[in-house]
Amino acid sequence: MFRTGIDTVELLEPEKTRLVPDTSSYFRRGRLFLEAVLRKELDLVVDQVQEWHDVPRESVAVCVPTNEKVDEVVARLSRRGIMATKITGDGARGSRACMSARCTASRGWSTAG
């Protein structure tokens, strides 16, 4: 999801990409960068869900890369007054709520519990 009013979208050519090693202790710089990007993206996701006021909440599912992010998405949605629940091994808890689950590229949807 891109918001051209917020983000500048640039076409990147992978063959022209220069990899730069992260020499910080335990890859600290790289991890901080990725965390900042993910936090920004989660804010955009929550904004988008809030804008979908005419879509039934149980029709909305948010997929994130880790179980910790599942909890964070549920908390952020709840703070905005949007009923949210996470999908666990037993399925989604509650009805009429926005759902959140962990998702991996190789395995698809995965439960958060």
Image (cartoon, rainbow, N blue to C red):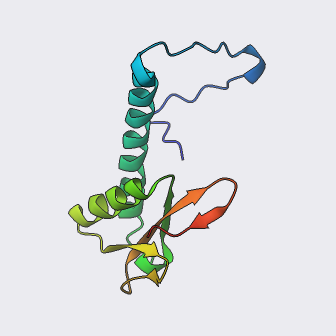
Give the vertical position of 18 relative to 34 (above or below): above
Total numbered badges shown on the rendered structure: 0
Residue 63 seen in this snapshot: yes
Give the vertical position of 61 relative to 27 (above or below): below
Residue 57 percent coordinates (x, y)? 41, 76
Residue 86 percent coordinates (x, y)? 40, 71
User: Viewed as shown, does residue 9 lie left or right of 97?
Assistant: right
Extreme residue toward the front, this view: 26
Extreme residue toward the right, this view: 15
Residue shown at 40%/54% (left/top)? 69
Give the vertical position of 54 relative to 70 (above or below): below
Q: Quadrant of residue 73?
A: bottom left
Residue shown at 43%/44% (left/top)? 41
Front-most of residues 21 and 16:
21
Front-most of residues 9 and 102:
102
Residue 54 percent coordinates (x, y)? 42, 74
Residue shown at 69%/16% (left/top)? 17
Residue shown at 73%/14% (left/top)? 16
Front-most of residues 12 and 110:
110
